[in-house]
Image: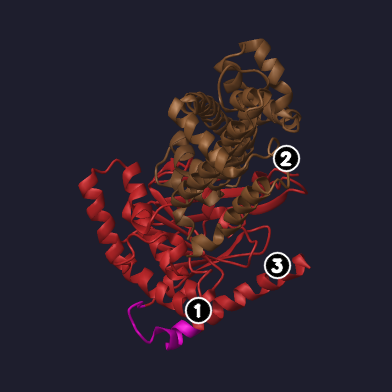
Chain colours: A brown, B red
Amino acid sequence: MKQFIRYLPLLLLALGWELAARLELVSTTALPPLSEVVVAWIDMIKTGELVTNGLASLYRAGAGLGLSIVIGGVLGIAMAWSKPVNVLVAPLVEMFYPLPKSALIPVTVIWLGFGDGSKILLIFLGCMLPVTIGAFNGARSSEQVLVWSARSMGAHKLRMLWDVVVPSAMPELLNGIRTALALSFILLVSSELIVAQMGFGYLIGYLGANGNYDAMYAVVLTVAFLGFAADRIYLLITKRTLAWRE
Amino acid sequence: MKAPLDRSRRLGRVHATMSVPAQIVVDQVSHLYRPPRGREVLALDQVSLDVANREFVALLGPSGCGKSTLLYLIGGFLPVETGAILVDGKPVAAPGPDRGIVFQHFALFPWKTVRGNILYGLERQGMPKDEREQRALDFIELVGLNGFEDSYPSQLSGGMKQRTAIARTLAFDPKILLMDEPFGALDAQTRGLMQAELLRIWQRTPKTVIFVTHDVQEAVYLADRVAVMSARPGRIKTIVDTKFDKNDPAIFKAKAFVEKVDEIWNLVKDEAIKAQGKRT
């Protein structure tokens, strides 16, 4: 019941959408009725169009995000751990951080072409910094006495890094990854909208250009839902990982 | 600054009267604390101290007298730059499992349960799984935390956290126990209970203990000898013998005990006043 009330505004929005379109309060080209969008969605599932394009997109987002988590996490912890690494990398991070990563879409295409590679590279570049910064801040906050405790119990330096610094960094690191997760969807769709032969973004652009608006809305809603679901699942994982924080 | 070693040995080892060679030798150790910003401070000035095997020594002094610094130097957490510290005849170079430490704020791994915290040191020592599981249970039992094996530190009271920390350190069986104001963060009742418990445990598993505190009664009650430290720069002002029958339930009211507390309190008072004066 609580869950129902929580999502009631969504239901009202859907109802309002349907009514506005049916009563022709707005042009049905601009906003086809929700029911027709749902029909278009079912059609696209049946033909497999949504699934093939969706899998292509998820592969790109997953690969880019995965790379950014591994490399960004290692880089952030290395920055907190070693002064030389920090001196070398920190200015690059500071300069690169405010750059809108969508500006790199043409660059990545020149480097890696129209296929998966350019999207994965873009998502990787865009998602890496929030992860790096989260890992850096988290690792830097690891308590001296915990490090000392581990050392006095016989942990050598690398072992201690894994046993103390990494778990200490975890809350902030997981926060950074959440930001990266949202960014990955944004960069995925915008890069596919501009140059791609496959994927959610490509499908939205292609259907829109051909006036196939109910199908286009179906794809937009699918992306919105996937983004929402990914965030929810991620929060659940975070909560379980950080169960020790009460 | 003049080299500290050039000065005469005012506080040479007058009090080192043990016939057996000491297990811990602190010889003319000075330590300069360099904060990231601001002026450097002489935290310890030519401190010498010998501690015998299985002896319980308290370092007593006002806040900021460098008693914790001395403990960290013995632990190998800070580098010995002037003077020498020997443990079992070997200079201290790094932390090691021969010297276990218990901190004021427990320093438990918050992401590990009580059991996980206690197991950690045993894992690092490479103890076989069955053996270390059994040993962890024994030490949980020893400090009376049965039923809380799978609790995280955030779910425990202060006293329980400190008992976990003590069990964690005792479990991997260090020869030397370094304790940095271990009961300082606890309320008065819990502190009294923990003191008695520490003595009980110490009598069962005898170890060399260096115990940092600013509580005179605690020092006299727990320790065989109390090293009274002066306000910054930290020096050992004097060392007082404080051997009493610890199992006497009326010890806190015994005349000899009360007088000893008084005597040491008078020594500390001047230093505490000096320390206060320097702060304001």
- Name the spot of residue A123 as percent of width and height, x first: 61, 27
- Name the spot of residue B261 as percent of width and height, x first: 52, 79
Give the residue at mark 1. B188
Query: Depth check: A82 or A232 in front?
Result: A232
Q: Residue at x 29, y 66 (%)?
A: B142
> Gap between marks 3 and 1, in whole Å?
24 Å
Which residue, as the protein is rendered here, is positioned at the far left?
B130
Query: Could you tell which of marks 3 and 1 lies nearer the N-terminus?
Result: 1
Q: Residue at x 23, y 43 (%)?
A: B128
Instruction: Tell whether B243 sits left or right of A121.
Output: left
Give the residue at mark 2. A27
Chain bearing mark 1: B
Instruction: Tell whether A158 sits left or right of A11.
Output: left
**Which structural element holds mark 3?**
helix
Which dot marks residue A109? none
Query: Depth check: A42 or A103 in front?
Result: A42
Q: Residue at x 62, y 11 (%)?
A: A113
Figure label count: 3
Q: Mark 3 is on which residue type?
A: Ala
> Gap between marks 2 and 3, in whole Å?
81 Å
Give the residue at mark 3. B275
B98 vs A37: above or below? below
Chain bearing mark 2: A
Which part of the image, by quadrant, shows the N terminus of chain B? top right
Q: Mark 1 is on which residue type?
A: Ala
**Which structural element holds mark 1?**
helix
